[in-house]
Image (spheres, rainbow, N blue to C red):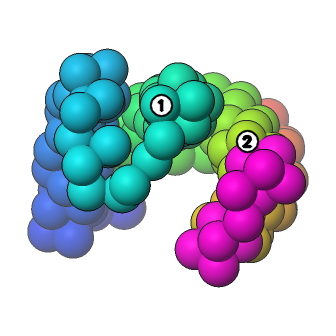
Amino acid sequence: MYRNSFVHYVTKICVDILFIVGIICCAIVLFSKSWLIKYFNLTSEMIVPMILVLITSGLACVYILWQLKIVFKTLIGGNPFVLENVTCLRKMAVASSIIAIIYLIKCLFWFTISTVVIVIIFVIACLFCLTLKDLFKQAVYYKDENDLTV
């Protein structure tokens, strides 16, 4: 039978820590107006759009981490091939595409190479999640079929 490994627990702890840090970072961004002006030389008319970009993408990242926590709960429980994980992977794909769209729009108004890299990374993450979603969906189908046969 399947056994949980040490890596599963370490990864789950890392996801939990990142989830908490993500929430803290989203809260800090709300109060970072002076810091953004000082260290990034942003003008006052660019502050609100930048904070909106950071908050919305940060919340989407926290949402992705929340979905990962759900997936790890089923993994550590010993039954990762369930429809709940298919739904979580689809939601992660949607959140990744939202982040890519946010930074693509940002790229139109304030182009940087790092913004392009972020768009590419999250488009790839979206495609990866959609591929895993289909893989998990097929595995759930095979598992259910096997359970009915036995």
Which secondary structure lies at badge 1? helix
Q: Would you call the spot at circle 2 few (<14 residues within 10 Å), some (14-19), or many (20 or more)?
A: some
> Which image quadrant: the N terminus?
bottom left
Q: Nearer the viewer, residue 22 or 9?
A: 22
Does residue 108 sit above or below 128 in this rendering? above
Residues tagged 2 and 1 counted as in contact (Cβ below 8 A): no
Residue receiving disc 1:
44
From the viewer's perspective, tell me whether residue 102 is left or right of residue 81.
right
Can residue 77 be seen at all in this image of the molecule? no
- The reply to whether the magenta stretch includes residue 43 is no
Which residue is rendered at x = 78% and y = 50% of the image? 109
Amino acid carrying label 2: it is Ile
> Which image quadrant: the C terminus?
top right
Which residue is rendered at x = 22% and y = 41% of the image? 35
Q: Position of residue 49 (x, y in %)?
A: 60, 30
Q: Position of residue 25 (x, y in %)?
A: 25, 35
Kindly indicate the quadrant of the structure image that contains residue 65. Answer: top left
Q: Nearer the viewer, residue 113 or 118?
A: 113
Can residue 15 be seen at all in this image of the molecule? yes
From the viewer's perspective, tell me whether residue 136 is left or right of residue 62.
right
Amino acid carrying label 1: it is Ser
- The reply to whether the magenta stretch includes residue 112 is yes
- Highlighted range, magenta: 104-117
Residue receiving disc 2:
102
